[in-house]
C-alpha cells in the first residue's frame, strides 16, 4: 500500500505529522520518524482539515456557466438551458465533468453527488481524476409514464460498468422529481433501491409551483408526503432543495432520516424561495448537508462560498444572527455530509478515510487567526486551498492539479461546439 | 513620467496592447510598437478590466476577523468588538490597515472609502502601498454633544498631514451616525463639507431600531429626512447601509443625488434587514455602489463576493430572478462607484485613470467563456486576479504583492496583542 506523510502541518492549533497508509489516516503525532512514498511539508504554515462533500451537483453543466443568467425560470430553461443540453455530446459531458472535477479539487471538495445525462462520461472523469462521487441513474419519464429511452440506455451502460468502477464511485437512482417521473416508476425504483442498498437522489420541494401541482395531482399530498407514501424516503434518500416544506414535511423527513441538500446560491439566483434553515436544520433537527447545484444556476462549485451563503441567508431570513453558526455550517459541509453518504470520513482522526485539505495560514484572509473554522466559513475562498487529498491520494499539491491546462482547453473547445 | 505597457491582453474579447503613461491610459490598440519602463505580457490569456471601488470599509478591523461571530448585535458590540477596539494602538491600526490594503489589492480593489479610529495610521498604510482611499474624520459625540476629544485629536492630525498626502488619498467628514452625533455637529460639518468641497460619509438607516429612535427623537423624521433637513445630503454624501428606507426616503436620496453604499454580507450576517434593491437601485434610480463593511461583520473585503451577494440577495428578496442583473451589479462596483467618488476611471478607455486588473482566463471558473462579466460576478473569486494597477502603478503582478509576508506577520503580531 502506498504511504503519504504530511510533515509539520497544523492540527487543532498544534504542529504535527500525519501518516496516511493506503486510503486511511494511520497516525497523527507531534513528530513521526518514518519514511513514506510521498511527503508534503507544511512548514508549520498549512492546517490539515477535512475536505468538503458536495451533496447535489450537475457536474457537466460547467459548460453552461454564464451561458444565460438573470432570466425568468421558464424562459431560462426552455429558451437556453434545454436547447443547449440537447446539443451536448458524450465527449462534451466528459469534458464538462473533468472541468467540474478540476474546479472542485481546486476548492477543496473530494466528493459530489451528481445527477446528469450520460453518467458513464462523468464516471470516466471521476475515475481518472481520483475523486469520490455518487453518480445518479437519471430518470425522466415520457408521456407513457416510462423512463425515457435515452435514460434507460445510459443507465444500463452505467450498471454494466459498475463492477469495474473503483469503490470511491457509487451509483444511485436519480429520478429527476415527482413531477417528471411517474408514480409507477417512483414506486419501483424505491423498492429496487431498498433491495440493492442504493441511494435515491431526487429534486424535491424546490418551487412553490411544484408543491401546488403535487397537492392538486395527489389528493392534497405535498411532494415530501407523496414521495414518502411511495416508499422513496429513507436514510439513503437525498432530497435536493427542500425550500418549501410544511411542519408536517419536516417531521416526515426527520422521522425517515432522509438527507436534505441545501443550496442557497441556486435558490437565491433562481428566486426559488428561502430555505427555512432555523426550522429545518436547527429546531427540526433534520440531516442537512450543502450542495452547489450545477454551474448554470450558481455559477461555481465552491463549497467555501456555499457555506458562507448558507450562514448568511439563514441569518437574513430568520432575523436572528445566532442562527446557522459557523461550526454547524462547517459540519454540514464535512462531517455530517460524510455521515450522510456513508463515508467513514469528515474529520481528521486516526483510522478515518484520508479525505483532507491543506489550508494556507499565511494568507491575508486567515488573519486575525482567532478561529480557523470562522475564517473558512466567512472569510476564505479557493485561494487558501493549498493541497487536496482524496482516499489517501494527493490530487492537488501547492495549488496545482496535473493536467489542468489541458482540461481547461478541452472544456473551452466543448463550449465552442455548444454555442449556437 | 513612468510608463507601463500591457502586451497582448484581452479587451472587449480581442487581444490588444495598452499603453499607460503616468497615471492614465494613453492608448489601446491591437499592436503598439513602443518601449515602456515596465511591461506585463498577458500572452492572450489575461483580460484587462476596470478595478473595483469599495464604498464602505473600516479597514483596520481585519484584526478582528473571526474574533466573535454569530452573536446578537448588542452582545457582539458591547462584549467583544468595543472592548477589543479599546485595546487598539496606533501601531495596531497601521498593521490592520496594511493587511486590509493587501487583501483588497489581492482581490482587485484599488480604492476604499474608510471610517475608523486614527485615520492617520490608515493614511500611512495607503500612502505606502499605493492604493487610493477616502479617509474619514471619524466623529462620535459625548454626552455634551461635542465630538469626542480622541476624534478631535486624530482628525486634527489628519488635517495637518493633508497637504503632504498624494492626490490619491482624500479626506472626508465621517460622522458615525445620526444617533451618535449631535444635531449641532451634523449641521456644522455639513456646512464645512459644502464649503470645502469634501465628502460626508455616514451610517444611515442600518437597523430598524435606528429608524424608530430617530422618528421618536426628531418629530417623526426618518434618519434620511432628518439628515437632509440638516443639510447633510448631497452628491458628495455617502450613506452606508440604507436597509430601512421609506418611499419618501428613496425620493429624497434620488433628488439630492446622494450615494448609497450597499453591503449585503454585513446586512445579512448581522440580520440588519434586507436592502430593497429593486425599489432603490432599479425603480428608485438612486446612485448605488457596493461596500464590504469591516472584517468583523463580513468577514472579508472581496468585492467579487460582494457583487454576487448583491445580485443573489436582490433576487431572493424580490422573488424576481431578473432583478440585479450581472451588468448592473458589475457597474455598481466599477464605473458607477468611480463616478460617485469623482474619479475619472471605472472603464478601460483612453484618457481614463489607469485603475485596472488583469484577470486569468485560463482558470476553471472562467470556462464556459460566454460572458466575462457574468463570470466575474457569479463565478470568480480572488484566485482569478492576476495583477492590479492603481493610478498607473503596478501594485500586484502575477498574484504577488511585494512585502506581503511581512504585512501578514505584523498583523498576526497585532492580533496577539489584542487577544484578551
Image (spheres, coloured by chain):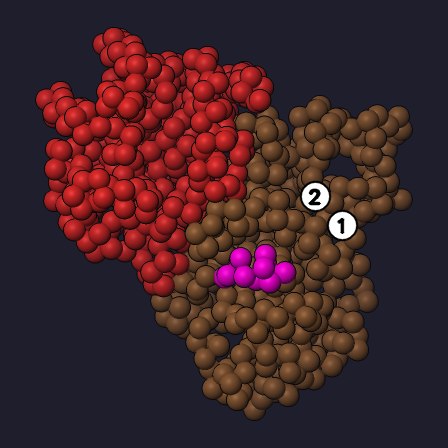
Chain colours: A brown, B red
* Residue B184 picture location, percent across and down: 16, 26
Horizontally, residue A163 falls left or right of residue B134, namely right
Quadrant (top left/top right/bottom left/bottom right) for the C terminus of chain A = bottom left
* Residue A132 picture location, percent across and down: 71, 55
Q: Which of the 4 image quarters holds residue B153?
A: top left
* Residue A190 picture location, percent across and down: 70, 79
Residue at 27% across / 15% down in the picture? Answer: B152
Q: Are marks 1 and 2 on the same chain?
A: yes
The reply to whether dot 1 and dot 2 touch (C-beta < 8 Å) is yes
Choose between A258 and A86: the one closer to the eye: A258
Asked if one can make out residue B249 in the rendered structure from this viewpoint, the answer is yes
Main SS, magenta region, reads helix
Choose between B225 and A398: the one closer to the eye: B225
* Residue A38 picture location, percent across and down: 80, 34
- Label 1 resides on the chain identified as A
Q: Residue farthest to the bottom?
A: A144
Q: Is residue A306 above or below residue A72?
A: above
Q: Mark 2, residues whose alpha carbon is within 10 Å: few (<14), some, or many (≥20)?
A: many
Q: Secondary structure at mark 2?
A: strand
Residue at 71% across / 36% down in the picture? Answer: A48
Asked if one can make out residue B409 in the rendered structure from this viewpoint, the answer is no
Choose between A300 and A405: the one closer to the eye: A300
Magenta stretch: give its range: A275-285
Residue at 48% across / 76% down in the picture? Answer: A210
Q: Which of the 4 image quarters holds residue B237?
A: top left
Q: Is residue A240 above or below residue B307?
A: below
* Gap in angstroms between the C-alphas marked 1 and 2: 8 Å
Q: Which residue is mark 1?
A: A345
Residue at 27% across / 46% down in the picture? Answer: B212
Q: Which residue is mark 2?
A: A50
Magenta highlight on residue A314? no
Q: Does label 1 or label 2 sit earlier along the sequence?
A: 2
Amino acid at each position: 500500500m502506498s504511504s503519504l506523510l504530511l510533515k509539520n502541518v497544523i492540527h487543532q492549533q498544534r504542529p504535527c505529522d500525519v501518516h496516511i497508509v493506503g486510503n486511511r489516516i494511520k497516525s497523527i503525532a507531534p513528530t513521526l520518524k518514518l519514511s513514506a512514498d510521498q511527503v508534503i511539508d507544511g512548514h508549520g504554515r498549512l492546517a490539515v482539515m477535512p475536505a468538503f462533500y458536495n451533496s447535489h451537483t450537475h457536474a457537466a453543466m460547467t459548460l453552461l456557466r454564464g451561458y444565460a443568467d438573470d432570466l425568468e425560470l421558464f424562459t431560462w430553461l426552455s429558451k437556453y438551458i434545454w436547447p443547449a443540453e440537447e446539443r451536448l455530446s458524450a465527449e462534451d459531458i466528459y469534458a464538462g465533468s473533468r472541468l467540474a472535477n478540476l474546479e472542485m479539487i481546486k476548492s477543496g471538495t473530494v466528493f459530489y453527488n451528481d445527477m446528469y445525462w450520460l453518467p458513464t462520461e462523468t464516471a470516466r472523469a471521476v475515475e481518472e481524476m481520483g475523486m469520490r462521487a455518487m453518480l445518479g441513474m437519471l430518470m425522466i419519464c415520457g408521456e407513457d409514464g416510462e423512463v425515457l429511452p435515452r435514460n434507460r440506455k445510459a443507465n444500463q451502460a452505467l450498471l454494466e460498468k459498475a463492477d469495474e468502477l473503483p469503490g470511491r464511485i457509487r451509483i444511485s437512482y436519480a429520478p429527476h422529481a415527482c413531477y417528471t417521473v411517474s408514480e409507477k416508476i417512483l414506486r419501483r425504483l424505491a423498492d429496487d433501491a431498498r433491495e440493492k442498498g442504493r441511494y435515491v437522489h431526487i429534486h424535491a420541494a424546490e418551487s412553490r409551483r411544484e408543491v401546488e401541482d403535487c397537492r392538486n395531482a395527489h389528493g392534497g399530498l405535498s411532494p415530501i408526503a407523496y414521495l414518502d407514501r411511495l416508499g422513496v424516503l429513507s436514510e439513503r434518500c437525498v432530497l435536493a432543495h427542500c425550500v418549501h416544506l410544511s411542519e408536517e414535511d419536516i417531521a416526515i423527513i426527520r422521522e425517515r432520516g432522509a438527507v436534505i441538500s441545501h443550496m442557497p446560491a441556486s435558490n437565491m439566483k433562481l428566486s426559488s424561495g428561502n430555505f427555512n434553515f432555523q426550522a429545518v436544520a436547527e429546531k427540526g433537527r433534520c440531516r442537512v448537508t450543502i450542495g452547489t447545484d450545477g454551474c448554470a444556476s450558481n455559477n461555481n462549485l465552491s463549497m467555501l462560498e456555499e457555506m458562507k451563503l448558507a450562514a448568511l441567508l439563514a441569518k437574513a431570513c430568520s432575523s436572528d444572527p445566532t442562527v446557522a453558526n459557523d461550526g454547524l455550517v462547517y459540519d454540514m459541509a464535512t462531517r455530517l455530509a460524510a455521515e450522510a453518504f456513508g463515508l467513514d470520513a469528515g474529520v481528521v482522526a486516526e483510522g478515518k478515510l484520508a479525505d483532507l485539505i491543506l489550508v494556507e495560514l499565511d494568507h491575508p484572509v486567515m488573519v486575525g487567526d482567532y478561529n480557523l473554522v470562522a475564517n473558512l466559513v466567512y472569510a476564505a475562498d479557493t485561494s487558501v486551498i493549498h493541497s487536496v487529498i482524496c482516499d489517501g491520494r494527493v490530487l492537488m499539491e501547492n495549488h496545482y492539479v496535473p493536467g489542468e491546462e489541458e482540461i481547461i482547453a478541452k472544456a473551452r473547445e466543448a463550449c465552442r461546439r455548444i454555442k449556437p
